[in-house]
Image (cartoon, rainbow, N blue to C red):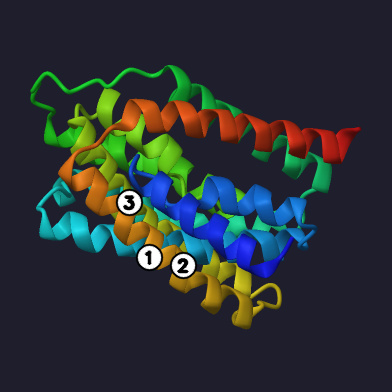
Amino acid sequence: MPFFLLLAIIFLASFILTMVGLGGGLIFSPLFVLLKFPVTTAVSASLFLNGIAAISAAIIFFRKKMVDVKTGLPLLITSTLSAPLGAMITARINIQIFTGILAMVIIVAAIRMLFSKKVEAEGTAVSSARRIIGGGCIGVLIGFMAGLLGIGGGVFIVPLLIYVLKVPTKTAAATSIFIVVFSSFSGFVAHISLADTDWKFILTAAVFSFAGGQLGSRVMAEKLKGRTVRRIFGVVLLLFAFKLIQRTFF
């Protein structure tokens, strides 16, 4: 793949995914695997670029006061602590098992984007105990999956914030981005301690990831047209998942 085309894809992935509370890792990780990057290199690069897109978007969301720090803090702490554990397992996992898990996660994300409806919380009060204990437990799983697969974890965070912790949709997406910053960089640090990193590539790509995050977050903050975006991107995710399965198992 030409380098300029790869950078354009990184920009578009960051742009589109930050609009729905993700960071770009759902595209970066399978894309780098398909381009035959070593698994540890693919995941570490994905986590770094995912974190860059997320921090870019988080800046906008904080300025717009869209992040629910109180709800997101338990998830942030536990996901940051558990992400290195997932990262350490990546280097030891069988490539077919790894690809199979990644494909299943992408298919789940695609189904959510294609068929989920825009659901707002009904304003039901959630107890502090539920917010802290529930959020902490959710964060452990999210951080582990983020470190293992290089996807940041936003695909799990958003629906759990909406349906379990009763957070409004836009707030859930913005808070998800805030959490993804920490889980991504925590997993990335663990990965670079285990394998070499192509700094020239990821620093160049980071510029495009940051720009995509800025644009996507601004569009979401002003007027989120998530339903159409989710449907289009859900199809893209399904294509990536099937391509991964075909390349690995057939």
Q: Position of residue 74 (x, y in %)?
A: 27, 48
- Label 2 – label 1 distance at C-alpha: 5 Å
Q: Position of residue 155 (x, y in %)?
A: 44, 37
Q: Position of residue 237 (x, y in %)?
A: 58, 35
Q: Which mark is residue 208?
A: 2
Instruction: Give whichever of 149, 6 is nearer the camera.
Output: 6
**167 w.r.t. 188: above or below:** above
How many numbered circles are shown? 3
Tell me the element at label 2: helix
Residue with the mark numbered 3: 216
- Label 2 – label 3 distance at C-alpha: 12 Å
- Label 1 – label 3 distance at C-alpha: 9 Å
Looking at the rendered image, the quarter that the N terminus falls into is: bottom right
The residue under label 3 is which amino acid type?
A: Gly
Residue with the mark numbered 1: 211
18 horizontally vs 222: left or right: right
28 horizontally vs 159: left or right: right
Image quadrant in which you'd find residue 135? top left
Q: Position of residue 201 (x, y in %)?
A: 62, 76
Q: Residues within 10 Å of mark 2 (few under 14, many from 20)?
A: many
Q: Residues within 10 Å of mark 3 (few under 14, many from 20)?
A: many
The residue under label 1 is which amino acid type?
A: Ala
